C-alpha cells in the first residue's frame, strides 16, 4: 500500500473512508494476483521445449481495431530493454491512475524504420482500455 494511502487510513476520522481505501488496495492486489498466473504460464511455456517433430501453428488472421495505450520512442538498440521496462511501468501507472482496466496482454513492437541498426522505433502497447466507454490513453515520446 502506498505510504500516502496508509497515512490517509490512519488519520481518517470515519470508518467509511478507511474501508474505501482498504477496499481499493484490496482490488489492486487482486488484479495483480490475477496477472501472476498468466506470467508464470508464459514463462513455463518458454522453458518447455515443444515435442520433437511438432512445429508451431502459424496462421494469418484479421483482428478488428481495439483501444490501446502506448508509449512510442526512437531508442538506441542497447537501451531497448531498460526503455521497455520503463515504458511498461509508465503505461501501467498512467492507465491505472485513470481508473482503466486491463483487457489484454502487454508487449512491444520494434523495427528499423529505415534507420541504421543501432536505433529503432519502439512501441510498448498495453492491452488496456476503458472497457465499455472506449476511451484510451496514448502517449508519444518524441526522439
Image: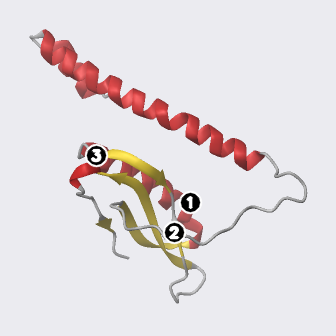
Q: Are marks 3 and 2 in contact (CB under 8 Å)?
A: no
| SS category of the residue bearing label 1 | helix
Label 2, label 1: how many angstroms apart (C-alpha)? Answer: 12 Å
Looking at the image, residue 1 sits to the left or right of residue 109; the answer is: left
Q: Considering the numbered disc 2 on the image, is that residue within a helix, a strand or a loop? A: strand
How crowded pointer 1 is (Cα within 10 Å; few <14, some 14-19, many 20+) is rated as few
Residue 73 % position (x, y): 41, 71
- The quarter of the picture where residue 25 lies is top left
Dot 3 or dot 2, earlier in sequence: 3
Question: Cα distance, mark 3 to mark 1?
Answer: 26 Å
- Residue tagged by mark 1? 81
Q: CA distance from mark 3 to mark 2?
A: 22 Å
Please tell me which of labels 3 and 1 falls first in the chain: 1
Mark 2 and mark 1 lie on one chain; the one further toward the N terminus is: 1
- Please name which of the two marks, 3 or 1, marks the residue nearer to the observer: 3
* 129 versus 56 height, above or below: above
Residue 132 placement, left or right of 30: left
Residue 100: assigned label: 3
Residue that numbered label 2 is attached to: 109
User: 136 and 85: which one is in front?
Assistant: 136
**Residue at image location 50% in from the left, 71% down from the top:** 62
In this picture the colour scheme is: secondary structure
Amino acid at each position: 500500500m502506498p505510504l500516502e494511502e496508509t497515512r490517509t487510513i490512519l488519520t481518517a476520522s470515519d470508518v467509511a473512508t478507511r474501508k474505501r481505501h482498504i477496499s481499493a488496495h484490496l482490488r489492486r492486489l487482486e488484479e495483480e494476483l490475477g496477472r501472476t498466473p498468466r506470467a508464470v504460464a508464459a514463462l513455463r511455456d518458454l522453458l518447455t521445449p515443444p515435442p520433437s517433430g511438432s512445429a508451431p501453428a502459424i496462421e494469418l488472421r484479421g483482428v478488428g481495431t481495439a483501444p490501446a495505450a502506448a508509449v512510442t520512442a526512437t531508442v538506441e538498440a542497447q537501451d531497448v530493454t531498460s526503455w521497455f521496462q520503463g515504458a511498461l511501468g509508465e503505461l501501467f501507472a498512467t492507465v491505472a491512475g485513470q481508473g482503466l482496466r486491463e483487457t489484454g496482454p502487454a508487449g512491444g513492437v520494434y523495427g528499423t524504420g529505415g534507420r541504421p541498426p543501432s536505433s529503432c522505433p519502439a512501441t510498448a502497447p498495453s492491452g488496456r482500455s476503458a472497457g465499455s466507454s472506449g476511451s484510451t490513453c496514448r502517449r508519444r515520446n518524441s526522439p
